[in-house]
Structure formats: structure tokens, C-alpha cells
Amino acid sequence: SFDRLLAADSPGYWTGAFGFVPSTVQWCESNYEVCHFIAEFFNTVSSLSILAAGLIGMIYTRRLEQRWVLAYATIATVGIGSVLFHMTLLRPMQMLDEVPMLWAVIVMVYCIIETDAVRPKYGRALPIGMFAYAVFVTLLTSLSSGHVQFLLFHASFGSLEFWSLGAIAMRARRET
């Protein structure tokens, strides 16, 4: 249920660490079940694959346009934030997970929109507008809490993900 996602204090190494409040969500794992130092053990370990995918992507795209390296760098940053979040279930680490996710999808949207152009067809207006949107959704999701934060983050992130999937599907349909 939705209420299960709302984080509750759990005994473990990071509970109340450094005076930080707990995260506003927790996922499907029981907290500190495998290790006293890792709140969600399997989510933490699996998040390392996100970091690896980002680093490998950065290596393979280093000779391409810098936007592709940036896209993979944001994915690597998501991996780092995800590890920290699932390891601690602390609110600041939740933001280190969710904010890079927002920025990563915004960079990906930029890459999708400008993918056909060697020179950006929208000039500087598109990246400036997307940067302003990134700042807006960062503030919106990081300054809210509870159900509101959960819904704002998922609406912001999910809408861009669905747009991206649709844009890629339409492009694939045109090219086949």
C-alpha cells in the first residue's frame, strides 16, 4: 500500500545519524535485515549497477558530443545517490538520489530533442529553458515532504520519462 512506502524510524546504524531526518519513503525491503550498516541491502547493492552503467557509458561516449558524456555522468550520479539513499534511508540522501534522477531525465530529453542536429537547432533557448525547469522541479521536490513530495517527484520525473519513451518510439517507427 501507499502508506508502506512512507518511511518510519527503524533501528539501525543510520537511524537518526548526524541529526538527519529519515527519508519520506522506503521501498520493499525490511530495513537493516541483512546488515546493521545498510538499511536496504539489496537495493543498495543493485544501485551499483546504475553507477557502473553511467561510468561505462561515459567511457564509450567520450569521443562523441559532450551532451552524451553529460547524460551518462548524470546516470552515474544517480547511481551514487541511489547507493547512499538505500544504504541510509536519510532525507538528504533521498535528495541525492531523486534530484540527479530529475536532472538525468532532463538531460536525456535534451539529447532526444537535439539528436538530429550537429548544431543545436534550438540554440541556447532550449538548454536555458531546461535548466530553469530543472531548478524549478528540484526546488519543488526537495522543499516538500510526505505524500506531496512523493507525488511531485513522481509527476515531474514520470512525465518526462513517458514523454521520452513516446518520442523514442515515434522515432523508431519513422526509421523502420
Image (spheres, helix red, strand yellow):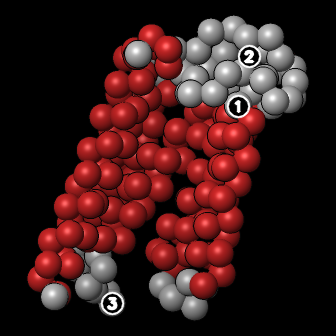
At a point 42% along the width and 61% down the height, the residue shown is 107
Res. 119 mark: none
> What residue is shown with label 1?
40
Res. 19 visible in picture: no
Mark 3, residue position:
118
Quick one: 70 or 160, which is closer to the camera? 160
Q: Is residue 149 left or right of residue 25?
A: left
- The residues bearing labels 1 and 3 have C-alpha atoms spaced at a distance of 43 Å
Above or below, comparing residue 165 to residue 40 in the picture: below
**Measured along the vertical axis of the image, is residue 78 above or below residue 155?**
below
Q: Are marks 3 and 2 in contact (CB under 8 Å)?
A: no
Residue 112 x, y percent position in the rendering? 30, 71
Give neighbour class at mark 3: few <14, some 14-19, many 20+ (Cα, 10 Å). few
Element class at badge 1: loop
Q: Residue at x 58, y 23 (%)?
A: 26
Between residue 139 and residue 128, name the one nearer to us.
Answer: 139
Q: Which residue is mark 2?
A: 20
> On the rendered image, what quadrant is the C terminus found in?
bottom left
| x 55%, y 68%: residue | 72
Labels 2 & 1 near each other (Cβ < 8 A): no
- Residue 103 horizontal side relative to residue 10, left or right: left
Label 1 amino acid? Glu
Three-letter amino acid code of the residue under disc 2: Phe
